[in-house]
Image (cartoon, rainbow, N blue to C red):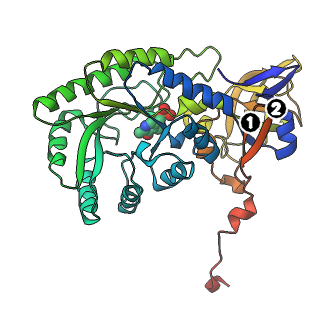
Amino acid sequence: MDHFTLRDGVLYAEDVPLSEIAEAVGTPVYVYSRATLERHAQVFRAALSDLKDPLLAFAVKANPNLAVLKVLQKQGYGADVVSAGELTRALAAGMDPQKVVFSGVGKTHDEMLYAMEKGIGQFNLESEEEGYELSLLAQRHGHRVACALRVNPDVDARTHEKISTGKSENKFGVPIDRAAAIYAALSDEPGLEMRGIAVHIGSQLSSLEPLESAFEKLGALIREMREGGLSVTHADLGGGLGVPYKADDVMPSPAEYGAMVARITNDWDVRLAFEPGRLIAGNAGILLTRVIRAKRSSNGPPFVVVDAAMNDLMRPAMYGAWHDFNAVVPTGERMTAHIVGPICETGDTFAMDRETDALGAGDLAVFRTAGAYGATMASSYNSRGFVPEVLVDGDKFAVVADRISPSAIMDAERVPDWLG
Ligand SMILES: *Cc1c(COP(=O)(O)O)cnc(C)c1O
């Protein structure tokens, strides 16, 4: 459920007509709904209410905007970060460092040091090598850091291959059949406090089955590790729950997920952590755009050229992803069209043969479910700027990220003297 609804024929974000935001800020622009973010944060927490004090760590990569992080911080959320930059953002939003977990296969020594000096709650180690390096660094700087070992359970998440992370051929975590031995070796490291295991098998999961089989494997591993005399007090179950991109998409509900987790982890006796990203932010944002013109095609529906492009919202070009596309002021008339951006690449296509509201030059429209993996994946390809972001709260709104102009980006570039 979200708070982008039609009222008197105009699409609103909460109590603000989107046309008012377009007028004030220009297009394209991302618009987030605070009420929707809060609702999702609360629904997910409620779904886990049978568990004892779980850590809820928002996956910052889904939407790293400071204001979004602040909304979630106020909901008691921590952060799952995958870079020093994301950690800086989480801390700037006031998140408790103890509620931060640091994932990622390529943490540099600088990033490790920075994170340990900020006192983060847990490193999720993705390899044995990383564990030894972190231990050395920790000892050298007088720290002992809490760690979980990320396990690759070799299950097929049955999602898009680019966002599947739990198959043995993926780069993430250590093979589950080697996990106990690696954990034992790392437990002897003086710089590390090995306290648990972590798993994250992929994103936009439309079924609970792969998650359930991964968690069952984790449970068996915990039992095996304890029988071997290892201490396990924490387990991080990652994120991955899918969200509906189409009205008729059926996704597992947070409540069903929570019940499954409670059942599987019933006898684990650990503190659980969760890293939801898309579930919290996906339907809490839209990308507001204006039609530049409609262009006839030689042998099919017209091209509706909008002012947003693949550099602003990469998901359709990158994953073939579907985003619902609606007029801000629908007339009731419908059309079939190809929805494209201005970029000089055929990949800059949001939809082919889409049955949509009739739209012409100057009309406003939205791509829905753009709050996760939207603005955060933007680039300046074709020397376009970065799209601004707006947060709506009831009848007020604020620009929470400025538009960055192409010339501001160019200001960071230089022609060396020797080129004349
Ligand atoms: C991306 C990621 C998440 C979040 O995934 P969602 O599908 O957005 O919930 C959680 N944990 C890790 C380690 C990730 O890489």
Q: Which mark is residue 16?
A: 2
Quadrant position of the C terminus in the picture? bottom right
- Residue 292 to residue 420: above or below: above
Decide which of tag 2 and tag 1 comes sooner along the chain. Answer: 2
The kind of residue on which mark 2 rests is Val
Question: Which structural element holds mark 1?
Answer: strand
Image side of residue 156 versus residue 34, left or right: left
Q: Nearer the viewer, residue 340 or 110?
A: 110
Q: Residue at x 44, y 31 (%)?
A: 239
Q: Which is more toward the observer, 263 or 407?
A: 263
Q: Which mark is residue 392?
A: 1
Q: Secondary structure at mark 2?
A: strand
Image position, residue 36 (x, y; %): 65, 28
| Quarter of the view holding residue 393 | top right
In the depicted structure, whether residue 219 falls above or below residue 420: above
- State the CA–CA distance, disc 2 to disc 1: 7 Å
Which numbered tag is attached to residue 76? none
User: Would you say 302 lies left or right of 272 here?
Assistant: right
Q: Position of residue 81 (x, y in %)?
A: 46, 46
Front-lying residue, 301 or 291: 291
Q: Kindly identify the amino acid type of the residue bearing the numbered disc 1.
A: Val
The reply to whether callout 2 and callout 1 are in contact (CB within 8 Å) is yes
